[in-house]
Amino acid sequence: MKLNSDLTLRANLNINNLKWENSPSAGVQRLRLEADDEKPPVERVTTIVSFAPQSSFSGHVHGGGEEFLVLNGTFSDQHADYPEGYYVRNPKGTGHAPHSDEGCRILVKLWQMHPDDQNQLAINTRNENLWKKNRASGEILPLFNADYESVCMMRWPAGLKLSNLSFDAGVEYFVLHGRFYDDEGNYTKGSWLRLPAGSRQNITVTEDCLLLRKTGHLLEPVSYE
């Protein structure tokens, strides 16, 4: 399956407009945002996964790494419980058996971590001590930074305007709440936006925003071929 797999093109979806698909595990559903699984075993995918209460997914190893953000509820595996707001990176070669007692939703990226990246992280983005004031654009919580990508959470206040932004290696957003727009569209809670390398952007924030942002990863995308 290929969906928004051409990383040289702009892509935009809102999860509220998508239809849930059943996974092989009972009680676990997903919404695909981007996918390219035509060269097994590599299955590059960005997806929203929903776990019903008391549901689980079979144990597995992350052949290309796994990155996720807990959107609501509590996600669990044999290592820990991750409540809403946790950002987790599981490098290539790690594995787990996920489940959720109360139910949860997570934003997941698979096969997109650099093969040499062995940083295993679990960060509580609701820890106010981790946030930093950003004079130009509200508040920022750095999550991961390397030569090949940077990941952060951002809080943008209503009324903020960001002009002539330049993303030489691309940018990707997921909106957790709030609203902003640029020259191409309007983005609300549940919006996923990916702009290719070389993109420019002018942003106006109309409602206080909380979002996950990733930059630097689309000029020379991770490849496992």
Image (cartoon, rainbow, N blue to C red):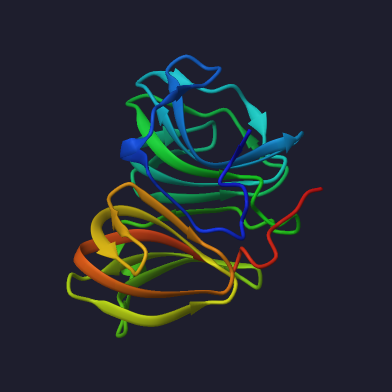
Residue placed farthest to the top in the image? 26
Answer with left or right where residue 144 lies relative to residue 112.
Answer: left
In this picture, is 129 found above or below 160?
above
Residue placed farthest to the right in the image? 225
Image position, residue 195 (x, y; %): 50, 63
Q: How many marks?
A: 0
Q: Is residue 46 visible?
A: no
Residue at 35% across / 59% down in the picture? 211
Answer with left or right where residue 107 lies relative to residue 6.
Answer: left
In this picture, is 25 found above or below 188?
above
Q: Nearer the viewer, residue 184 or 57?
A: 184
**Residue 51 lies in quadrant:** top left
**Residue 160 lies in quadrant:** bottom left
Residue at 40% across / 30% down in the picture? 50
Q: Nearer the viewer, residue 28 or 7?
A: 7
Residue at 35% across / 43% down in the picture? 71
* Quadrant in which the N terminus appears: top right
Image position, residue 125 (x, y; %): 36, 57
**Residue 138 lies in quadrant:** bottom left
In this picture, is 23 found above or below 162?
above
Image position, residue 19 (x, y; %): 39, 28
Residue at 37% across / 22% down in the picture? 52
Q: Nearer the viewer, residue 90 or 162?
A: 162
Q: Is residue 121 visible?
A: yes
Image position, residue 191 (x, y; %): 35, 50
